[in-house]
């Protein structure tokens, strides 16, 4: 499944090229020659006009020819900015991603600088982008963040490419994005439980409005519907992918009348909370309850019992993101702006046929 349908296009004013002197001149209501004098610090421009042109330069994020030459030279040993949302330090997703990304960077002779999104929240996008250009960054990878047209507009103005990894909202058709086949993975996991004989299969979701989780919930609902069991994907309880969320929702589900015989969690760390809820309630896994996760992180192989889960190639996603950004930085293009790596189910010890009534 891809996210082409329903994706929101970039705003019409998002430039597809670097800011030019002509664009600055038009915005500042001066001649191109006047802008050139300001950019090159030459005389012959009044103080008020010079201030107005400089303001427009800062607003549009213009980068000088000399700065561009320095950035181009840096492509021999490129440095990429890796922008991430604050994440749960117990969730191994980011560590798996960083493992693949740093490995690819080493192989390609590149470097990564990691920064939290909230650390730049007070900066204007144009100031942020110009700072990256001044520090000779070759591009930006954003991981599990909410897309910002302002950030991309600012990056394009200084000639820096962007790659999105598992963006919270739906990927843009004009912006390179990388993820996994979330819908197909969820469909396969649910089908596995159905084939074991389960009919009461609950899904515990992740962050509200997260595109990856909407796809996973849709895959679960589609598999249930194909087997003749109607479920409501919109009624799925969502919160962060976390142990606490899995524990709280699973506790409620397992205490309810007609409790599920199987729970599919949207992430391995959420499934850990499900396993703990079952343990505290004295419910045996997998004899009385089957549990499936998503990601196939180290948690799945170290839990008790070992977790059946959807393998998401997280490290390969990191490698692919770095390789794609390097190609974009060198001026190459892609036939498609969306890349999804295949998932597959890994069956371990946490699933079994449902108990006999």
Image (cartoon, rainbow, N blue to C red):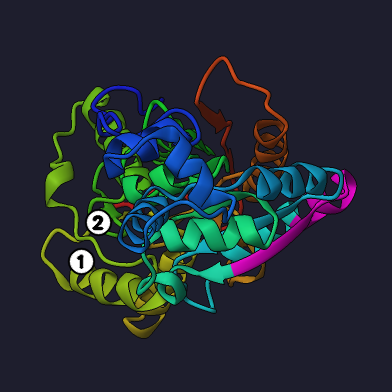
Residue 15 higher or lower than 137, as above or below = above
| Local secondary structure at mark 2 | loop
Give how far apart the Cα atoms at labels 1 and 2 are: 7 Å
Left/right placement of residue 281 relative to residue 100 reads left
In percent of the image, x 35 and y 49: which residue is there? 147
Residue 258 higher or lower than 315, as above or below = below
In percent of the image, x 32 and y 52: which residue is there? 356
Q: Where's residue 119, x and y in %?
A: 46, 76
In percent of the image, x 43 and y 42: which residue is there? 34
Instruction: Give the residue furthest to the bottom.
Output: 280
Q: Residues within 10 Å of mark 2 (few under 14, many from 20)?
A: many
Instruction: Give the residue furthest to the front.
Output: 44
| Local secondary structure at mark 1 | helix
Of 219 and 307, the residue lying toward us: 219
Q: Is residue 144 in the magenta section?
A: no
Q: Which mark is residue 61?
A: none
Q: Earlier in the sequence, mark 1 or mark 2?
A: 1
Q: Residues within 10 Å of mark 1 (few under 14, many from 20)?
A: some
In percent of the image, x 78 and y 50: which residue is there? 78
Q: Is residue 103 in the magenta section?
A: yes
Instruction: Give the residue furthest to the top.
Output: 335
In this rendering, the count of numbered labels is 2
Q: Which residue is mark 2?
A: 260
Q: Which mark is residue 253?
A: 1
Boundaries of the magenta span: 102-114
Is there CB contact under 8 Å for labels 1 and 2?
Answer: yes
Of 289 and 88, the residue lying toward us: 88
Q: Quadrant of residue 118?
A: bottom left
Left/right placement of residue 130 relative to residue 60 reads right
* Quarter of the figure with the N terminus: top left
Q: Where's residue 114, x and y in %?
A: 62, 67
Left/right placement of residue 287 relative to residue 325 reads left
């Amino acid at each position: 499944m891809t996210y082409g349908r329903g994706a929101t296009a970039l705003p019409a004013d998002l430039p597809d090229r670097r800011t030019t002197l002509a664009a600055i001149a038009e915005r500042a209501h001066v001649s191109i020659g006047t802008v050139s004098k300001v950019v090159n610090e030459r005389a012959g421009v009044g103080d008020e006009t010079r201030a107005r042109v400089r303001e427009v330069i800062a607003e549009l994020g213009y980068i000088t020819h000399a700065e561009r030459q320095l950035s181009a030279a840096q492509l021999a040993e490129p440095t990429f900015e890796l922008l991430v949302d604050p994440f749960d330090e117990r969730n191994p997703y980011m560590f798996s991603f960083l493992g693949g990304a740093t490995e690819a960077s080493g192989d390609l002779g590149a470097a990564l600088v990691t920064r939290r999104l909230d650390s730049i929240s007070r900066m204007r996008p144009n100031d942020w982008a110009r700072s990256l250009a001044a520090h000779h960054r070759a591009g930006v990878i954003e991981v599990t963040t909410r897309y910002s047209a302002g950030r991309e507009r600012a990056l394009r103005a200084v000639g820096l490419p962007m790659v999105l990894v598992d963006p919270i909202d739906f990927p843009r058709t004009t912006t390179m994005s990388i993820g996994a086949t979330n819908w197909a993975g969820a469909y396969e996991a649910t089908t596995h439980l159905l084939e074991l004989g389960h009919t009461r299969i609950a899904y515990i979701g992740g962050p509200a409005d997260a595109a990856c989780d909407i796809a996973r919930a849709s895959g679960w609902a589609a598999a249930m519907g194909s087997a003749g069991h109607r479920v409501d994907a919109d009624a799925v309880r969502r919160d962060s992918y976390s142990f606490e969320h899995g524990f709280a929702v699973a506790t409620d589900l397992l205490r309810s009348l007609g409790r599920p015989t199987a729970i599919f969690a949207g992430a391995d760390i959420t499934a850990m909370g499900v396993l703990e809820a079952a343990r505290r309630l004295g419910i045996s896994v997998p004899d009385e309850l089957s549990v499936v996760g998503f990601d196939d992180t180290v948690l799945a192989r170290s839990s008790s019992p070992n977790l059946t889960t959807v393998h998401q190639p997280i490290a390969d996603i990191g490698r692919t993101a770095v390789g794609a950004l390097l190609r974009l930085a060198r001026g190459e293009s892609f036939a498609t702006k969306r890349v999804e790596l295949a998932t597959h189910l890994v069956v371990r010890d946490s699933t079994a046929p449902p108990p006999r009534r």
